[in-house]
Amino acid sequence: MIDVLSGVALITDPGTIIWIMFGVCFGIILGAIPGLTATMGIALMLPVAIQLTTATGMAMLLAVYSGAIIGASIPAILLGIPGNPNAIATVYDGYPLTQQGRGAEALIAATVGSFVGGIGSLLLLGLFAPLIARFTLRFGPAERAALALVGLTIIASVSERRVAKGLLMGAFGLSLAFLGPDRITQTMRLPFPSITTGTPLANGIQLVPALIGLFGISQALYDIDRVRSGRLTPPQVSLRGSIPKPRIFLKMWRLMVESLGIGTFIGAIPGAGASIAVFLSYQRAQRTAPANAASDAPELGSGALEGVVAPEVANNACKGGSLIPALSLGIPGDAATAVLLGALLIKGVVPGPQLFVDELPLVYAILFALLLANIFMVVFQVVGIRFFPKVLSIPIYILLPLILVFSLLGSYAVEGRAIMAASFNMGVALILGVVGYFLKKHDYPIAPIVLGLILGDMLEQNFRRAMRLARGDYTVFLRSPIALAFILLAIASIAYSVRRARRAKAAAGEDDEE
């Protein structure tokens, strides 16, 4: 009890609370700009955190982390442009809600989901951190490869009735992931090595510029085309009557609990990433939405609140999940927690099992800082909801060019001072933006491309490492209970998607007959 009070005292200092508030505001603004990620925000504020006390500095960095995650949902919902890769699934129903004039309602749903995910994972972090951390240590290359395989099966789900087109786009995304050098041998895969060696192309295509191009620039070009043809009318978002009733979210309790478990579990696996978690939770929402019937549009993809809540719960749950191996074992769950670990090490604090013995007040201070960060996140988001939709009141002939400019700036900022690489990223974003525009015009889904790009590298690296460790014995995937369970889950997911597509085709045939 003394350790708890000592930890709380470290955070309740007025100066520390002000730094937490600043961190949340900075994170929300940063996350709302496409291309600027939570990792980048934490890295930018690291020099400031080093000058503060350990508890205050960590509290401020965690606040930036929390704010950036919820901030990414703002452009995803209002403009159809995810602020970072983890907000992709939020676009599917968030942007249709905005187009229906319910953008403020979608923002509130995202805030509720973020708060549930943040607080829920915080409780799991405080109660089961050592236990979950020990379990995730069992995840070797074979288990991670099988997990990536499960992620790839989601392509069929997010493609809706365009399964063939979705698989084609997934293959295109995988081909983009395999550009650059071989990750194991470091040999060049691209032709013309004399040209590509020493250029940014030798390192392959980065995810953030590709994401900005495929979602941001392509959407802006597509909207420009619709404006010219008179098919686009800017949505009018009104706050009157747009606040969802609490009972709507209470009906989603099961979906929230499942998304919380998915996000915390995936976040606790080092290297897995929140992108898999949000798609898994979205896929789960697709299966349970008809039973929940919490919104007026229970079919996901057409503007269902479940499609906003589920990925946001999982996305924020990954935040607490990634801290489990970071604090318990000293193993970062993702890039953002790697920077957080760096801040602790600079301050002379060594993460690991001994941290819960020697620095227990600091552990409680971190937990309480996360609690305050989540509370301030909700407060600032609710206040901002009155102002965020105002961006849609900007004349469309001004808004769309601004989106293009900010998208290009976001892709440029990924590389910082490396001018050549930054310019290359802008070119990648622009080229993929044009490609995405033509794909949208011909009704090809974009999300499978990003899924292939995210999971392709993870699948290849871990599969090949598993094969090398097993000396080419493929049964390594069958001997591992975790890997086998994931493989069976992938098969079940494919079977469910095929069955769902056949039912949808049969239903469409019956409608045509009528």
Image (cartoon, rainbow, N blue to C red):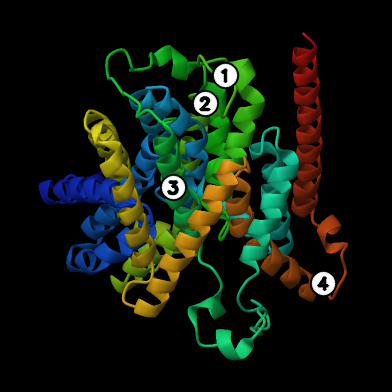
Q: Are marks 4 and 3 in contact (CB under 8 Å)?
A: no
Q: How far apart in space, not on screen, are marks 1 and 3 (Cα)? A: 30 Å
Q: Is residue 332 visible?
A: no
The image shows a total of numbered marks equal to: 4
Foreground disc of the pair 2, 4 = 2
Q: How far apart in space, not on screen, are marks 3 and 2 (Cα)? A: 29 Å
Q: Are marks 1 and 2 in contact (CB under 8 Å)?
A: yes
Foreground disc of the pair 1, 3 = 3
For label 3, the residue is: 221
Could you tell me which residue is drawn at 39 percent across and 40 percent down? 73
| Mark nearer the N terminus (4 vs 3) | 3
Structural crowding at the residue carrying mark 1, measured as other residues with C-alpha within 10 Å and reported as few (<14), some (14–19) or many (≥20):
many
The kind of secondary structure element at disc 3 is helix
Q: How far apart in space, not on screen, are marks 1 and 4 (Cα)? A: 46 Å
- Mark 2: amino acid: Glu
For label 2, the residue is: 306
Q: How far apart in space, not on screen, are marks 2 and 4 (Cα)? A: 42 Å
For label 4, the residue is: 470
Foreground disc of the pair 3, 2 = 3
Q: How far apart in space, not on screen, are marks 1 and 2 (Cα)? A: 8 Å
In the image, is residue 349 above or below residue 72?
below
Q: Are marks 1 and 4 in contact (CB under 8 Å)?
A: no
